[in-house]
Amino acid sequence: MWSNKLKGLLIVVSAPSGTGKTTLCHMLLKEIPTLEFSVSYTTRPPREGEVDGRDYHFVTKEQFERMIEEGDFLEWANVYGNLYGTSKSQVLKALEEGRDILLDIDTQGALQVKKNFPEAVLIFILPPSLEELERRLRKRGTDPEEVIERRLKTAREELKKALCYDYLVVNDELEKAFDQLKGIITAEKLKSERLEGQLNRLVKDPKVVELVEEG
Ligand code: 5GP
């Protein structure tokens, strides 16, 4: 288990595909400029428009396996036959420097992170219903029938793990879900243990109250 003295906030977001997780994560990153995205490593080939180093670090299976052996990952998982992993050094460095970091990872990875790093804030985004999820997946029109079926089957499995998360957000209306996500992050940043340093200074100097208010 890693140190709990890290200053930044580690936020982990998971959701079944088609729930709107990517959109919500982009909205959060735009809204909170100090929030950093953890760029994962993957063996899956880039999709059109994806940029190496921005969306993912695209690597070969051999490179990925070498990184596993060298202990470079905070977590890693096999998702739909491709390997995905989070760089331990990138995340720990950000947290040590007091930067907040956002991980968009699957449930297997999220639970590994929570096990090793209990202060991580795990947020699961739920579809309003499985019928609605199916409707959204079909509406996207990007996947053949068997892929849609597989995604729905995986979604049912992932939903079973939702209760291991700290927060559940239903993406019924995008703006409402976005507000709830922002609310979670704000509340987490205001936890007394995170503000202990400021509080100690306040006890010594009443002027420091301004610092607490500014967060
Ligand atoms: P996609 O290939 O569609 O970008 O991602 C497929 C799934 O892999 C998504 O659920 C995404 O959250 C997850 N994923 C992306 N990066 C990582 C990672 O570093 N670790 C794990 N465990 N899952 C990841």
Image: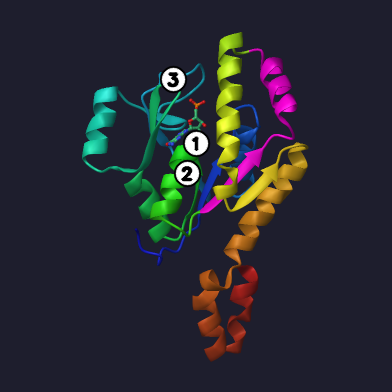
Relative image position of residue 213 (x, y in whole percent): 65, 72
Cβ of mark 1 under 8 A from ligand 1 = yes
Cβ of mark 2 under 8 A from ligand 1 = yes
Given the image, on which type of amino acid does mark 2 rest? Answer: Ala
Residue carrying label 2: 110
**Front residue of 13 and 205:** 13
Q: Residues within 10 Å of mark 2 (few under 14, many from 20)?
A: many
Can you see residue 144?
no
Relative image position of residue 147 (x, y in whole percent): 56, 14
The dot on residue 46 is 3
Instruction: Work out how far the residue at label 1 is from the one at label 3, CA to CA, in angstroms.
Output: 18 Å
Label 1 element class = loop
Check the image and report above or below for 183 versus 169.
below
- CB within 8 Å, label 1 to label 2: yes
At x 41%, y 18%, the residue is: 45
Give the magenta-colored segment's residue range.
121-141
Instruction: Work out how far the residue at label 1 is from the one at label 2, CA to CA, in angstroms.
Output: 6 Å
Check the image and report above or below for 35 versus 191.
above
Please state, as top left, top right, bottom left or bottom right, where the C terminus lies in the image. Answer: bottom right
Q: Residues within 10 Å of mark 3 (few under 14, many from 20)?
A: some
At x 61%, y 88%, the residue is: 206
Relative image position of residue 211 (x, y in whole percent): 59, 74
Mark 1 or mark 3: name the one nearer the start of the chain.
3
Residue 60 occupies which quadrant of the picture? top left
Residue 78 occupies which quadrant of the picture? top left
Relative image position of residue 34 (x, y in whole percent): 54, 52
Residue carrying label 1: 106
Mark 2 or mark 3: name the one nearer the start of the chain.
3
